Amino acid sequence: MESLWIVGWAIAGAALAWYVQRPLILALGGTLLLAILGSTCFLLFLQMGWVPLAAPAFAAILSGSAVIAYRAYKVPRVDT
């Protein structure tokens, strides 16, 4: 079950990086994504639940970074 939790957040990070083009909006969205993750983990902890926090955060950041690197490499730039 924890692996689905981690994979879900990795997909969320990758989707955010794929669909958001502007760097400022991407940074704000990434911050919001990590804040939602932290808040969810904390609320579940208060309800006597436990889900990992560090691994999904790392997965979201890493998958988002991979998408940004892929797009920078694959998308040709037009010099004007």
Image (spheres, rainbow, N blue to C red):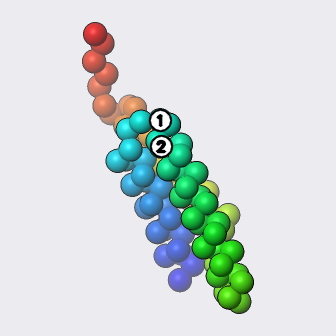
For this rendering, which residue is in front, 14 or 39? 39
For this rendering, which residue is in front, 39 or 80? 39
- Are the two marked residues, 2 and 1, in contact with CB atoms closer than 8 angstroms? yes
Q: Position of residue 31 (x, y in %)?
A: 58, 51
**Picture quadrant where residue 58 is located:** bottom right
Q: Amino acid at mark 2?
A: Leu
For this view, does 48 lie left or right of residue 34? right
Q: Classify 23 as above or below 11.
A: above
Task: Bin the neighbour count of mark 1 within 10 Å (Cα to Cα): few under 14, some 14-19, many 20 and up.
Answer: few
For this view, does 30 lie left or right of residue 44? left
Can residue 69 be seen from the camera position used here?
no
Q: Position of residue 28 (x, y in %)?
A: 53, 46
Q: Which residue is mark 1?
A: 23
- As drawn, which residue projects farthest toward the bottom? 48
What distance separates the C-alpha of mark 2 from that of mark 1? 5 Å
Q: Which residue is mark 2?
A: 26
Q: Residue at x 53, y 50 (%)?
A: 30
Q: Position of residue 27 (x, y in %)?
A: 53, 43
Q: Amino acid at mark 1?
A: Pro
